[in-house]
Image (cartoon, rainbow, N blue to C red):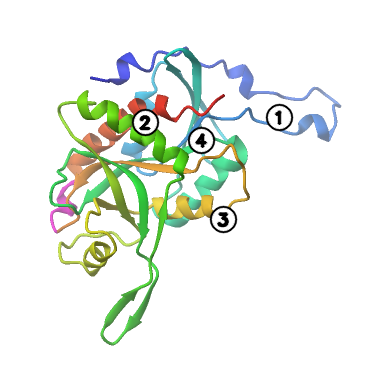
Amino acid sequence: MISGSNIVTGSAISGSRFNAAAGPGAGPAADAEPEEPRTDLGVITVLPQEQHAVVTALTGGHASRPSPGGPQYYEAWLPVPRRPPMRVVVLQTLRPGTESAALAARELSTRFRPAVVLLVGIAGAVADWVRVGDVVISDQIIAYDARRETAGGPRVRGWVQTVRGELGHRLNEFDAHHRYTPHDPRFRVFRGPVGSGNAVVTDRDSHIRTWLRTVHENVLAVETEAAGAAQAFHEAAGDSTRYGWLTIRGISDLADATKPSAGDHHDLAARRAASVMLGLAPYLDFRP
């Protein structure tokens, strides 16, 4: 069984690398912020419970880093077998939704140049076989926001985006190992498509759930950020060292009428998503 305590054992990062202040009279060039070293993993969270779960999972090897006029980053080093530690940067979005997630993904990509960006947090299950407390790794996003309103009801004009092949191969390795050596016997980890959009689904008979099943009969869950991050990567200028995005979601509810009372499961779902993030991270090491 993999746990945060036996994976994250890195030493804390010195604050000096965050404070490259210029001396008196050094001029504008010296005042410019130094170029960031490349990051191995960028992590985006949304809710406070998600941010707390991820940062707590990295305890023992992280340091906070305020950004003037912007979000606070957390930087950490994750030990991996037979390799130097992986550099991880964590960023919480300003608010829920695809737009804020797209901006966060662009901020991470521009400033820290991560090889992979992970969206780690919670989601609502729509597949009958997925339970509260399970974790979903999404290798395909089905965006459901775009639609045409008609007298006969909404006509969804969604789109689908799949992760890059390089990430798919790494997920295959993770699946092969953990299928026979469960990550944690207390919950199950599924891989498959997830619906994403700004609308929060709280109705079992929602037209969104119905439409998602017409696109893919095995859609696992719904959430509200991944479509934004996926589109940000799709539109970004090419960089062969960027492998795109993945979504890791702990299931906090069943995307039905019970959702408003499901807040008690947010912490649990976020912690389990963060735990799977730690287990998956070594498989996402693309360094030569």
In terms of sequence position, does the residue under pointer 1 or pointer 4 come before the other? 1
Q: Residue at x 34, y 37 (%)?
A: 50
For marks 2 and 3, give the one nearer the viewer: 3
| Whole-number angstrom distance, CA of label 2 to CA of label 1 | 27 Å
What is the number of the mark on residue 72?
4
Q: Earlier in the sequence, mark 2 or mark 4?
A: 2
Label 3: state its secondary structure: helix
Q: Residues within 10 Å of mark 2 (few under 14, many from 20)?
A: many
Q: Residue at (64%, 30%) from the top-left corner? A: 36
Q: Which class describes the residues within 10 Å of circle 4: few (<14), some (14-19), or many (20+)?
A: some
Question: Going from the N terminus, do you reach mark 2 or mark 3 first?
Answer: 2
Q: Please name the residue shown 35% across and 24% down the image.
A: 57
Q: Amino acid at mark 4?
A: Gln
**Where is mark 2, residue-wise?**
54
Amino acid type at circle 3 is: Glu
Q: Amino acid at mark 1?
A: Pro
Label 1 environment density (alpha carbons within 10 Å; few <14, some 14–19, many ≥20): few
Q: Secondary structure at mark 4?
A: loop
Nearer to us of marks 1 and 3 is: 3
Which of the two residues, 56 or 284, is positioned nearer the viewer here? 284
Viewer-nearest of discs 1 and 4: 1
User: How far is the residue under mark 1 from the one under mark 3?
Assistant: 26 Å
Q: Position of residue 112 (x, y in %)?
A: 59, 35
Quadrant in the picture for residue 97: bottom left
Q: Kindly identify which residue carries mark 3.
A: 235
**Does residue 167 appear in the picture of this structure?**
yes
Task: For mark 2, give the secondary structure.
Answer: helix
